[in-house]
Amino acid sequence: MFLVSSIPIQPDVPFGPPHERSDAARNRERLLCAARELVDEFGVEALTMDALACKAQVGKGTVFRRFGSRAGLMMTLLSDSESEFQRGFMFGPPPLGPGGTPSERLMAFGEGRIYFVLENGELLKAAATNARNRFDVPATVLAHRHIEVLLREADIADPWVMAMSLLSALDPERIVNDVRVHGISPKRLTESWRELVARLMRSS
Amino acid sequence: MFLVSSIPIQPDVPFGPPHERSDAARNRERLLCAARELVDEFGVEALTMDALACKAQVGKGTVFRRFGSRAGLMMTLLSDSESEFQRGFMFGPPPLGPGGTPSERLMAFGEGRIYFVLENGELLKAAATNARNRFDVPATVLAHRHIEVLLREADIADPWVMAMSLLSALDPERIVNDVRVHGISPKRLTESWRELVARLMRSS
DNA sequence: ATAGAAAACGGACCGCGGTCCGTTTAGTAT
DNA sequence: ATACTAAACGGACCGCGGTCCGTTTTCTAT
């Protein structure tokens, strides 16, 4: 029954859990469970730190020690689906995974990201607000590196910066806004992304 | 001494101010003055609604009635420089203003925007946080329309969505992060933007 | 079993953005 | 001048994220 789910956020240096205390483990389980219930029942905006502490029968300080901040909590909640998506573009089959041309992979990446955002939009937005740095969170850094590598194969002068620009275009808040406020269909979004990538990476 | 500065946020239907009361005008002046002092002396993050109310010798409710929210206050503070920038790309000389090719104009727009953001980054970020809609604020809508029109003259399939994507790449938080956290020079940013536009808009 | 230390706990506390509503004040009509 | 009305006012109040610190619990060494 050790560590049934969720690897510790900070992978401590050598390996193995540095003896997580039993009460801590129990409380984490309780908190995650309560958090998911709260989200499922009342939506992300109802997932208040106080409400969570109350529902999980735990002190508020405990919630913050566990997750650091509300954004950290949201990231923990996201980590499973995020990991799945990451596996997709790092090890999965083409066109998303290794094997296709950089252009194809980048198009597939954007498309996958768009649908991922549309499924987890509220969580992603909550994970981004007031985070010390929306951009330097592991998942985002990884996505950026991925794009950067793909761009490097296409004669982009400054792949690092260009990757940032492209990543901005996949910003959750922007995508959710386009769809929910302006009624843009996911299809239009992905097709426009494909056009952007195609025009950017065509060799001529 | 009527309306010495700052047009009312909601341009009331026909014209003319609907008799703004003298105390309201006096308080607005006091508030804007105090706000600028606070920012100049202690930075944007010190511009608290309470601190502002206190410094301007005004009730907190007054601050909120005047500006609606902290984001609204920030937008008011920005409106002068924002208007100037807008005049630049709408009526100014080429390459920013009318006269150049769409590609040149778009490059110049991004460059101008980047430097604008680097001068007003903190204010822009504060204006964007917790705004009902970061995107549907007048200045942003105008910029979007501008890009859209320029794109329409190239053969972009979906100028509306593409304009959104490009605008995302100029997001203040992103630009400030690149420069301040990662030490990217403004020059690199603008050159990468130029490359993006060039590749996007070259015809064949 | 026992003692000691480290870690986890819990909830009072803070500052902030934002709201509400009873009170005051500026303009207007007489 | 006076009375009336609509607007502006002000500050108590709320919920939230986040911190702090005295108390409790778990583990380990003896």
Image (tube, coloured by chain):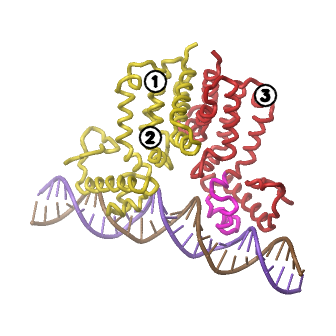
Chain colours: A yellow, B red, C brown, D purple
Q: Earlier in the sequence, mark 2 or mark 1?
A: 2
Answer whether labels 3 and 2 touch (C-beta < 8 Å): no
**Label 3 is found on which chain of the structure?**
B
Q: Which residue is mark 1?
A: A149
- Circle 2 packing at 10 Å, graded few (<14), some (14-19), many (20+), is some
Is residue A186 shown left or right of residue D27? right
Q: Which residue is mark 2?
A: A137
**Label 1 is found on which chain of the structure?**
A
Give how far across and how far down residue A71 sits, in percent: 44, 49
Label 3 to label 2, Cα distance in Å?
40 Å
Q: Is residue B57 magenta?
A: yes
Find numbered disc 3 in the image and state the secondary structure of the residue it sits on: loop
Give how far across and how far down residue B178 sits, in percent: 56, 36
Give how far across and how far down residue A58 sits, in percent: 33, 62
Q: Quadrant of residue A64?
A: bottom left
Depth check: B50 or B63 in front? B63
Q: Which residue is mark 3?
A: B94
Q: Give, as a three-letter code, the residue at label 2.
A: Val
Depth check: D24 or A202 in front? A202
Q: Give, as a three-letter code, the residue at label 3.
A: Pro
Q: Is residue B162 above or below residue D28?
A: above
**Label 2 is found on which chain of the structure?**
A
What residue is at 32 percent from the left and 63 percent from the top? A57
To the question of a shared chain for discs 3 and 1, the answer is no
Q: Quadrant of the C terminus of chain A?
A: top right
Question: Which numbered mark, 3 or 2, is in the foreground of this view?
Answer: 3
Q: Which residues are magenta?
A: B48-74
